[in-house]
Image (tube, rainbow, N blue to C red):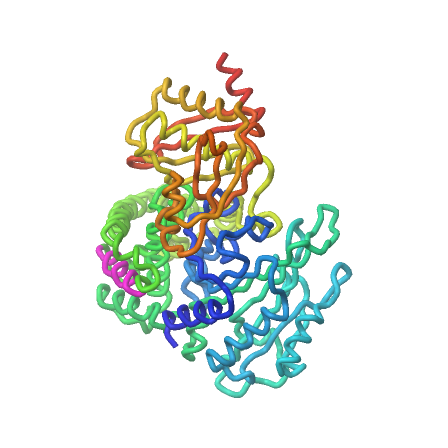
Amino acid sequence: MTANELRKHYIEFFVSNGHVEIPSASLIPENDPSVLFTTAGMHPLVPYLKGEKHPQGNRLVDYQKCVRTGDIDEVGDETHLTFFEMLGNWSLGDYFKEESIQWSYEFLTKELNIDLSKLAFSVFSGDDDVARDEESANVWLKLGVPEDRIAYLNKEDNWWPAGGKNPGPQGPDTEIFYWTGSDSAPDIFDPENSLWVEIWNNVFMQYDRTSEGEYVELSQQNVDTGMGLERTTAVLQGKANVYETELFVPIIKAIEDIANATYSGNERAMRIIADHIRSSIMMINDGAKPSNKDQGYIVRRLVRRAVRQFLNLGLESGGVETVAVAAIATLSNAYPELEDKRAEIVAELTKEEAKFSKTLKKGLGEFEKMYKTAGHVSGEEAFILYSTYGFPLELTEELVREKGADVDLDIFQLEFKKHQDLSRAGAGQKFAGGLADHSDESTRLHTATHLLHKALKLVLGDHVEQKGSNITSERLRFDFSHDTKMTVEQKAEVESIVNTAIAKKYTMSFQDMTVDEAKEAGAIGLFEDKYAQMDGKVKVYTAGSDSEVFSREICGGPHVDNTGELVSFAIVKEEASSAGVRRIKAVVGESAQKTLGARG
């Protein structure tokens, strides 16, 4: 079964069982400062998992684009990918363990015709806080799973989020494993045996962990399932790893052709190039362009690592475009917009490739200066080459070895760890309690973006459209289309309009509408491409009343009950974000009052 067939089959199966298909959310999270990228299928559904009403109902199914950046340096082995897709089905307070497990079992054994003898299962073993998950185990047993094929594991293995130490919604999960060995699967399931590969995970959000560490049953219990598309495709095709599937083979063939090299003997280099360019095109497609900040920094890092691997294959420049075109071809069936944006994506990649080729030469010159000065390259200097010039450690080591010396790896790793800790803190690799920040303060700031968006349109014109948003508990950041720097008078007028809307204490309410109804009602569609794919309804938030509407936007929430809760609004900074895009940073509440007061 191909990846395209698996995607289609999965969606059709769950739609036939009462689920509604929803489109993949952007890789760049909407109004969520906790992660740089969408890291899991549940990520875009956080408000609904916490109780917001989803306009498409309480049974959902999708395939979601995901990126995880914590293991970029590990890519090139048998298992790690930067960009991947997650097949998921969801119950928002509807069905629970029994139905979820039965459908998982039916899809695998009846729809995909996987023999039960090749499957094994794990469930939560229980501890002092929460009892053993006999309910899930009993459902598997009723379906005919032998007792020896069920393993009971602790919170690190069968709880989401792992360990269950953070406050917030969480619960046990049950995982499904497939036997990849050439011989028959052992009768007794040993989770430590690497030939058992996890292909599916059903998470049961059953509890809320209080700040005191108590586990309280949730009033809305949810099901969140995930099946990795790439890994499952490899398993179903009997391939040793994902790079042997049709998702990667054409990309690797393009690398072989352009570099005049063979995959055999160059596996690691070609896997890095294939993964990194494939990931980059998906990031650029969703608005992340190579830069030194946030998502753009990750794109830059991926492209530069790919260029370095091309150099290892003997190609100094010019390989990225060929690989990007091949990668787009493998993904355009699921994401047709890639073909529409192909020229733009390729232009960004080739521009970064050319820039790094120059940087690489400068870095080589810097290396020579370092070595000539001291007769060696220290760990600190190796890290400077890594962080400033994009030199992977192995490149510096190789250059030093050629001169008969070594790099102080301990010092390098110390510097690298400092950098990694800062990077991970900024990216927020794990969001609080496993869920994104929806505190009262961030909710107020989220509402403020609606008022700001409307005010910008009123002051600057209807060409203003949201191009990005990031909210922390302290401030909002709003990117919008506009060519020129705002004047002092324009900023003052925007502030005045927003503060008037706050003073009027407009009610914030929502309605479920079709996309056409929302447009007819004058709603602003921030992510029109995404919503246009929906046949069902979207959530439209209105600030105001039938007699006086201030703003109306398509949005998932959450929002305050009335605008008066914002108290006050102030623009802290207005600056360029990228070509044709401006950025505003603003605050509300007491911080806004202090900012306005300081101006006199």
Q: Position of residue 55 (x, y in %)?
A: 49, 52
Instruction: Return the residue nearer the eye: 381 or 196.
Output: 196
Residue 544 lies, with reference to residue 171, above or below; the image says: above
**Residue 510 is one of the magenta-drawn residues:** no
How many discs mark residues in the rendered view? Answer: 0
Magenta-highlighted stretch: main secondary structure?
Answer: helix
Q: Position of residue 383 (x, y in %)?
A: 43, 46
Q: Residue at 62% across / 62% down in the picture?
A: 204
Report if residue 457 is visible in the image: yes
Q: Residue at 43% across / 26% down in the picture?
A: 573
Instruction: Return the residue nearer the eye: 551 or 310.
Output: 551
Q: Which residues are magenta?
A: 318-330
Q: Position of residue 481 (x, y in %)?
A: 32, 35
Instruction: Return the residue nearer the eye: 532 or 275.
Output: 532
Q: Is residue 94 left or right of residue 541?
A: right
Residue 36 lies, with reference to residue 159, above or below; the image says: above
